[in-house]
Image (spheres, rainbow, N blue to C red):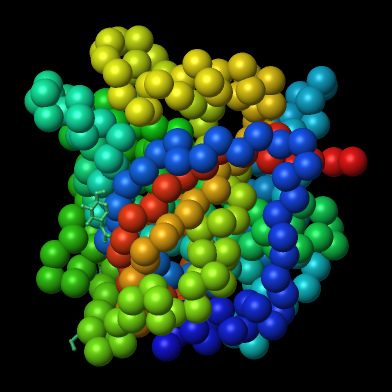
Amino acid sequence: MVHQVLLLILSIEIGTFHPYYASAFLIDRLVTGDWNGVGFYISVEREAIKKKLDNYHSSVSNECNEGPRLFVPKVSVFPTMHNNDRHPVYVDFGFMRSHDFDEYLKDNPNPCVSTSGLEVAVTIPLLAGKPDGPPIYALALTKFYEKSRGDIPKINFLYPYIPVDEISLRDNIALVRNGSDEMKISFNRSSHYCKSSALIVKEEFNEFLFSNFQFGLPVPDYSFCDRHSFKSKFCSNAERIKCGVQRYAPNLCQVWKSNDFGSCAATVEIKNITSGFRNFILLDDNPVNILASQRFHGNTTMALKYPCQEFN
Ligand SMILES: *[C@@H]1O[C@H](CO)[C@@H](O)[C@H](O)[C@H]1NC(C)=O
Ligand SMILES: *[C@@H]1O[C@H](CO)[C@@H](O)[C@H](O)[C@H]1NC(C)=O
Ligand SMILES: *[C@@H]1O[C@H](CO)[C@@H](O)[C@H](O)[C@H]1NC(C)=O
Ligand SMILES: *[C@@H]1O[C@H](CO)[C@@H](O)[C@H](O)[C@H]1NC(C)=O
């Protein structure tokens, strides 16, 4: 199983760690949803990651505020899978359905609010908080969604959302298209390799795929809640976190958790990718090297942590 190999390598290379929450706030279950999709790691140049991190640092710091710091770990992650001058980027695509507005939408069907749809996300995983620190942070780069979904990105602070013309998923081909730019990914599920979460190495799976601390999210935007006056779980958190967010941003991160994920082996191949999307996933012009891939489905929750990096 690809991901078990992956997890084994990870647990050997990285060891386990225990998150440190001395004086931070962890607001649990801020967002809930379920996911059914495919995720994979590609190998990219370390330099490309560093450049992206530099951009991120300059976008979040000013004279008064240093902002969080992220580093490519000194020791390569996945050392047996690619050269030392490489680092992985994580891409996933699939169907995400949010449950946070279920009750509201049942009573108020609203064609401008779409809480489910196909999404494609790009993340730099396994980053460190200091040059020799453990690789427990991630940086969310982007999440593509279809323009036609209307208001959804506004209420969302999971990812820097970017609209594209089209995302489709059929016949084992995922396609993202924006004008003449496209990314076409072919994937196969090997169904006989599916395991329920009771059987997979659950803790590691959660730890590395979901419980890392993900920076790069936009500051929560609750203007949706002002425009549509109703009680929802999502909006009821607004008052609770507004001050904390204002005080600590951009040093806040999301923490994904899942209780009941199932996962299956899958193979993934990028069939076509034009320069626009190459830039988004930090690829150069060389052939794409996919390190590992899997298909997974289940319910997830997202917590918000602030301050995310704690210095003492
Ligand atoms: C998609 O195309 C539009 C119009 O050409 C452009 O403004 C936008 O930046 C593009 N988005 C992405 C994700 O490339
Ligand atoms: C999936 O299977 C089809 C048919 O066997 C094959 O043409 C395609 O290349 C496979 N794709 C991947 C990513 O393995
Ligand atoms: C996708 O790949 C095919 C075959 O490799 C090529 O003919 C086509 O022009 C590509 N499409 C784009 C948008 O690059
Ligand atoms: C996720 O949660 C929803 C509602 O809470 C439930 O109906 C669904 O069966 C769950 N999905 C999985 C895969 O457990």
Q: From this viewpoint, which residue is outermost toward the front?
A: 198
Q: In this view, does 261 lie to the left or right of 6?
A: left
Residue 67 image point, x, y percent = 74, 33
Residue 78 image point, x, y percent = 63, 79
Above or below, comparing residue 149 to residue 259 in the picture? above
Q: Which residue is drawn at 51% across and 64% down?
A: 206
Above or below, comparing residue 36 to residue 172 in the picture? above
Q: Is residue 110 left or right of residue 293?
A: left
| Res. 270 in view | no
Q: Which residue is drawn at 46% across and 20% down?
A: 238
Q: In which quarter of the image is ligand 2?
A: bottom left
Quadrant the C terminus occupies: top right
Q: From this viewpoint, which residue is outermost toward the right?
A: 312
Q: In the rendered picture of this protein, how many numbered marks are placed on residues? A: 0
Which one is in front, 36 or 196? 196
| Res. 210 in view | yes
Which one is in front, 269 or 203? 203
Quadrant the N terminus occupies: bottom left
Residue 287 image point, x, y percent = 46, 77
Which one is in front, 277 or 252? 252
Q: Residue at x 85, y 41 (%)?
A: 311
